[in-house]
Amino acid sequence: FNSLRIWVYFFLNELLIVGGSFGLREFTQIRYDVQKIRKKLDPALEAKVNKQKQSVILEEEYQKMKEVDLDKWKNVRGPRPWEDSKQYQEEQRSQQGKAV
């Protein structure tokens, strides 16, 4: 009876070790599969990361900045967190009406 108990514990121990190794392999594979899926980037974002396409994007951004008229640009401050946004918007509108 004593040797049977030893064999049962031995078998359970081996089952735990072998089963655990298979389980760990599956979980790590899932982890790497998820990383591959997350690694796929948006085409626009991928172009920004890709150095070959980056010069083209810089050219496009430069053209956009050339078209912007900075002389007529006006800085508009947004409401602070402690301010009531509707009240602040009304004040801004009234000030714009007086300025025009």
Image (spheres, helix red, strand yellow):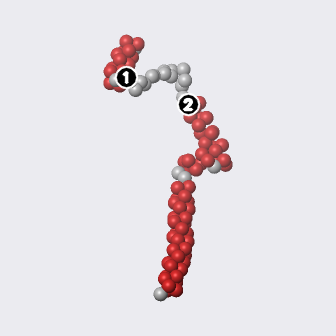
Kind of residue sitting beneath label 2: Glu
Relative placement, left or right, of 8 versus 93 is right
| Residue drawn where x is 58% and y is 31% of the image | 65
Mark 2 or mark 1, earlier in chain: 2
Q: Quadrant of residue 69?
A: top right
Q: Position of residue 15 (x, y in %)?
A: 51, 77
Q: Please, what secondary structure does the residue beneath circle 2 have?
A: helix
Q: Residue at x 45, y 22 (%)?
A: 76
Measured as percent of width and height from the top left, residue 30 is found at 51, 64
Q: Which residue is mark 1?
A: 83
Compare residues 11 and 48 and report the one nearer the observer.
Answer: 11
10 Å crowding of disc 1: few (<14), some (14-19), many (20+): few
Q: Tell me if label 2 and label 1 are in contact, CB under 8 Å.
A: no
Mark 2 highlights which residue? 67
Q: Nearer the viewer, residue 62 or 21?
A: 21
Residue 89 left/right relative to 74: left
**Horizontal relation, residue 18 to residue 99: left or right:** right
Q: Is residue 14 visible?
A: yes
Q: Nearer the viewer, residue 4 or 59?
A: 4
| Image point (54%, 28%), residue name | 68
Q: Is residue 84 left or right of residue 5?
A: left
Marking on residue 11? none
As measured in the structure, the alpha-carbon distance from the residue carrying label 2 to the one carrying label 1 is: 35 Å
Q: Quadrant of residue 18?
A: bottom right
The amino acid on which the numbered mark 1 sits, given as a three-letter code, is Glu
User: Circle 1 — which element?
Assistant: loop
Quarter of the figure that contains the C terminus: top left
